[in-house]
Amino acid sequence: MTIKPNDSDGRSTDSSTDGSDVDGFLPEAFRSWKAEIEETIAQKTAQIERQSAQINALESKVDAQQAEIETQQATIDSQTTALHQNKTRIAELEATVEALEREQTDYREANERDKAEIRQDVTENKRTTEQNEAHTDAVARKVENSEGREKRTPLEQVVRLPEEILHRAKLTANQRRARMIAMELGGLATTVPKGKRLDSTTIKDQLKREYGSAHDQTVARVMAFLDRLGGDRTEVVHTGKGKAVIFDDWLANRLKRAEQFTSEAVDGVLTNVVSVTTRTAG
């Protein structure tokens, strides 16, 4: 340490720049105390630095946890929104199901009513058809007797009825279909040893062309009508693909050459029998 007089008052001052020289003048106990203080300060400083590092680490961890919490909250919000949407959709579906159940119940009730009406209509139509077929036979026989000519089968007589008086003859829908098939026999039937054969498939196809549709029951009724009115000259046979009506050559030729009556020729006959049955749509 360097001691020199002070310029202002002549007292000596310390002009040294470090404390090493000063320590030489300090008591040993003071120097020891100073060293302890410096060591304590260094330890505290190191402790503070460690705690600061821990605090920084904790702050980073807190920041990460906060970010994770925000992410989880966003997920929860999204799931909550989806849950509300699902609840709304479920409510809509439940309402739709209830509406469909009511509609199905109404449909079943209406279907049962329709089936009951159909069964009643079928019964009435069957009875009316039987009456009308008997009526048609009567018309054919009366027309035959009124002419006093060569005997014809009832099928010929039906084919010869004019279109304009069919409604007066009270032919059912299936009888009209059979009449149309008989009139087209030449172009529909195939030749077989027994005469002409008309199979059920051909009849069904022709009915579809003429009327737009043909159920199997309709085809069966038409074939039965052709067979019954053809008398001994027709026969229903079973084939590998269904049934067919066989017309003998005599009847096939007669149907091919059949000429229709005039309305005047049968007017009196129909007038006498027209009130026998009630007309039906067949």
Image: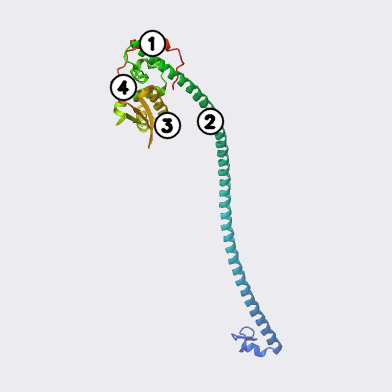
Q: CA distance from mark 4 to mark 2?
A: 44 Å
What is the x, y in percent for residue 138?
41, 15
Name the residue beneath numbered marker 1: 269
Q: Amino acid at mark 3?
A: Asp
Q: Nearer the viewer, mark 2 or mark 1?
A: 1
Q: Earlier in the sequence, mark 4 or mark 2?
A: 2
Q: Determine whether label 4 and label 2 are within 8 Å by CB.
A: no
Q: Residue at x 62, y 74 (%)?
A: 50
Q: Amino acid at mark 1?
A: Val
Q: Earlier in the sequence, mark 3 or mark 4?
A: 3
Asked where in the image residue 135 lies, by quadrant, the reply is: top left
Q: Amino acid at mark 2?
A: Asn
Q: CA distance from mark 3 to mark 4?
A: 25 Å
What is the x, y in percent for residue 73?
58, 55
Q: Which mark is residue 111?
A: 2
Q: Determine whether label 3 and label 4 are within 8 Å by CB.
A: no
Q: Earlier in the sequence, mark 3 or mark 1?
A: 3
Is label 1 in a helix, a strand or a loop?
Answer: helix
Q: Amino acid at mark 4?
A: Leu
Specify few, some or many for label 2: CA neighbours under 10 Å numbering under 14, 14-19, or 20 or more. Answer: few
Name the residue beneath numbered marker 3: 216
Q: Nearer the viewer, mark 3 or mark 4?
A: 4
Specify few, some or many for label 4: CA neighbours under 10 Å numbering under 14, 14-19, or 20 or more. Answer: many
Specify few, some or many for label 1: CA neighbours under 10 Å numbering under 14, 14-19, or 20 or more. Answer: many
